Image (cartoon, coloured by chain):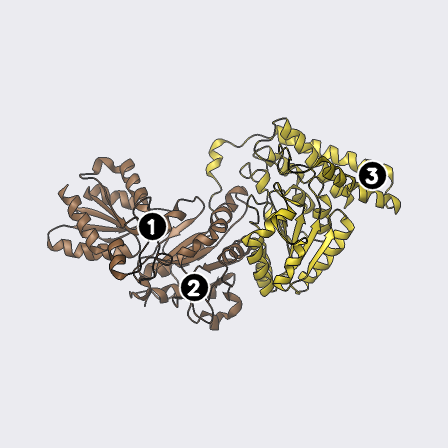
Amino acid sequence: MTYAEAVRDALREEMRRDPSVFVLGEDVARFGGCFGVTGNLWTEFGEDRVRDTPISETAIIGTAVGAAATGMRPVAEIMFCDFLTVCMDQLVNQAAKMRYMFGGKARLPIVVRSPIGGGICAAAQHSQSLEAWFAHIPGLKVAMPSNPADAKGLLISAIRDDNPVMFFEHKVLYSSKGPVPEGSYTIPLGKACVKREGSDVTVVATSIMVNHAVAAAADLEKDGISVEVVDPRTLVPLDEDTILASVRKTGRVAIAHEAVARCGFGAEVAAIIAEKAAGSLKAPIIRVGAKAVPVPFSPVLEQFVLPGKADITGAVRKVMAA
Amino acid sequence: MFRQMVRIRAFETRVGELFAQGKIPGFVHLYIGEEATAVGVCSNLKPSDYITSTHRGHGHCLAKGGDMKAMMAELFGRKSGYCKGKGGSMHIADVDIGILGANGIVGGGLTVAAGAALSAKMRGTDQVTVCFFGDGASNQTTFHEGLNIASIWNLPVVYVCENNLYGISMHQSRHQKVADVADRAGAYGIPGVTVDGNDVMAVYEAAKEAIGRARAGDGPTLLECKTYRWKGHFEGDPTLYRSVEELEEWKRRCPILAFNGRLLEMEALSPEEAASIQSGAEAEVEDAVKCAAESPFPSPEEALEDLFA
């Protein structure tokens, strides 16, 4: 099953289970979603529960907030995460704040699904990875599945969660395939996955960089370097224990995400390791991320700016040599 | 309705005094002069109906049935306040009686109200949502996106613009070309109605029709109530942007005095009853102030609670 199908499978399972779950967003019904994720869900659930909206990101999130506060469980799709910038008030000042500033009296079970990432020559306004913006805001949870099985299990957990969850799907991963269990199952938010065990270096990687890290680890193994790959799966809540346990085992760390390295989530992970496991470190922590420019159009430029397998391989060699 | 208007005036007057004495921290934005709007609209609502409110929300909250003691305690930052001291004046909410929150962001509630109305429609209830906002908010994205989505989905929501003539310091004539915000309803294919927002009966009748339309499944209405805030944008605002004469003119059109006069004329209320309502409201406010002042502050560690469900 592909990653896109796994997301759709999760939506279908939850819509069948719970009549308060509904999907809204631009072109999610007849068109099936910009990346085909919502497919033909509307034929089973109708256009009331698979709801096309105008091109109005603020209204998509705002109506999701109002619906969630009054008993529904909306799953909103924002076509590209770049467009989340259009509805930041509704996410940051409304969705993230309401429960807290009302003294814990409201429940806001909202999922905002949005594709992140470059790699398809979509240029600067359709290729960003903005997860760190949302991880910075108390009141939002942030999920970043790296494979189909995780996508399905994490999305079902996100839909059942009574809080706003930002669910970032990598657009290059949509066509990637992997085994996905049938029926309903959950992967808890806040539980990391050790994708590959190793003893020399820990690579903490998110989303598509997990795949690059696993591929880099296979290459490095030939040179006798044993790499452990940890996928946090959710940035908020963050499974610090699994990351720190791995760091204490290997003593060396590289952190990889596709977002710009500066002020990226990797900085947070590096700081946590420095605060809580500095004594275990045999070498300085290295971060791998995009260069600090907008994502350019030409494939040559895009590949230069975005990190990939070679950057992780290089980072691991550097941390081993330190 | 008269009693509710008097309660709001008494509450706001006392809050203004307490703020000046330094007993209420933060900002307060008072509703004095606009009482007829909240009361005229909310008198048509059931407890199960929803409202979204603004940063000038005390009047809406009281008119929708909010608890005065919990409101005052919140303004004092106490544990017994509506939001356990985490929200303050700009964020009072009582989801149990449909108050989906005051809002510190101008226009923040306009799409949220559409969402509450969508939810009622999808759940098959007859609940109506009323969204209060100001003339200033009618220039925000949320106004246009909210009214558009409410109209295409035929949602049971009434958009109530309290046109008090000022967006903070900017007179309405300087921040928009239209004289009547209700004219903008035409852009969304929904009815737009303008009424004298200082005439509680006129507001009541117009709101009754709009809320009835919404409840019957006939979709949203944009109702504009022309009114005026007597105080500055916030307490402490020196209001250098408007003339004393303008303020005096509007004070002569006090919604409470006007309604009182009308009720006396109709012999629906005696001067003694009016005086008793006034003193009753003042006593209720004093009781709320006493309760609030005697309530404990939250412990600092409580700041870490209530983030996630």
B36 vs A209, left or right, is right
Q: Which image quadrant: the N terminus of chain A? A: bottom left
Of the image marks 2 and 1, the number of the one nearer the N terminus: 2
Q: Say which residue label 1 marks.
A: A191
Q: Are marks 3 and 1 in contact (CB under 8 Å)?
A: no
Q: Residue at x 60, y 35 (%)?
A: B75
* Residue A90, numbered label: none
The span from disc 3 to disc 1 (Cα, nearest Å) is 64 Å
The kind of residue tagged 2 is Leu
Q: Colour of chain A?
A: brown
Q: Secondary structure at mark 2?
A: helix
Q: Say which residue label 2 marks.
A: A11
The chain letter for the residue carrying disc 1 is A
Q: Colour of chain B?
A: yellow
Q: Position of residue A256 (x, y in %)?
A: 26, 50
The kind of residue tagged 1 is Lys
Instruction: Examine the image and state in which quarter residue A82 appears.
Output: bottom left
The chain letter for the residue carrying disc 3 is B
Q: Position of residue A172 (x, y in %)?
A: 31, 62
Q: Is residue B306 above or below residue A160?
A: above
B240 or A165, nearer to the observer = B240
* Label 1: few (<14), some (14–19) or many (≥20) C-alpha neighbours in 10 Å: some
* Label 2: few (<14), some (14–19) or many (≥20) C-alpha neighbours in 10 Å: many
The span from disc 2 to disc 3 (Cα, nearest Å) is 59 Å
**Residue B267 seen:** no
User: Which numbered disc, 2 or 1, marks the residue closer to the eye?
Assistant: 2
* Label 3: few (<14), some (14–19) or many (≥20) C-alpha neighbours in 10 Å: some
The total of numbered circles placed on residues is: 3
Q: Residue at x 29, y 57 (%)?
A: A208
Q: Position of residue A245 (x, y in %)?
A: 25, 43
B12 or A223, nearer to the observer = B12
Q: Are marks 2 and 1 in contact (CB under 8 Å)?
A: no
